[in-house]
Image (cartoon, helix red, strand yellow):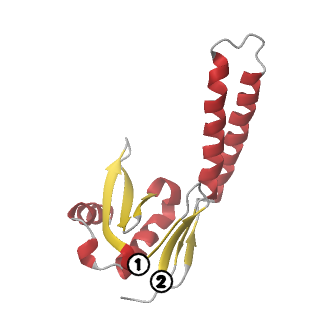
Amino acid sequence: MQKIPTEEFYAPRWQKIMYSTASAIVFVLGINVLMIKEPNWIIFLAPFIFIISFSMLLYTRLKLIISDDKIRLTGGLKRYHFLWSDIKKIDMVRLGKYRTPLVTIYYSGGKVTLSKSLYLTEFNRILLLLEMKVNPELFTENYQKIRHQMD
């Protein structure tokens, strides 16, 4: 396997700014819902609004670090880190209206999913690093098919 340099991948700056701003607006909306004089059923809506605001803020902090010895995904509620040798299978599917590719890496401790919607222009570089470091037999047939369609 080839030796690769350590690289960090983030969401684009414009996406971080947009989600951070939307998170603040949604948080203010949640506060306004709590200030309603006669809350009745709407008071139960506030916790969901705060959860959405918090998850949007966490989404902007996600960071994927690929190094020569392991892969790390930090910034969310759960941190993932595993060695290249721990990888059991890599699969790819297309989801949604725009058929956005999602790569799922199965490793001995679980799985992690990487979406093109988060990494946008860097997604192809991430796939290239995976293909350089992982044994070709670990890529599923579906991954190979979708990868050829992307090229």
Do the residues under discs 2 and 1 have CB atoms within 8 angstroms? yes
At 67% across and 27% down in the image, what residue appears? 46
The spot of residue 11 in percent (x, y) is: 58, 59
At 51% across and 80% down in the image, what residue appears? 67
Residue holding disc 1: 84
For badge 1, the amino acid type reads Trp
Near mark 1 (Cα within 10 A), the count class, few <14, some 14-19 or many ≥20, is some
The picture quadrant where one finds residue 25 is: top right
Circle 2: element type: loop
Looking at the rendered structure, which numbered label has been put on residue 69? Answer: 2
Regarding residue 15, the answer to whether it shows in the image is no
The spot of residue 101 in percent (x, y) is: 37, 55
Regarding residue 102, the answer to whether it shows in the image is yes
- Residue 148 vs residue 3, the one in the foreground: 3
The spot of residue 82 in percent (x, y) is: 46, 73
Looking at the rendered structure, which numbered label has been put on residue 150? Answer: none
At 37% across and 41% down in the image, what residue appears? 97
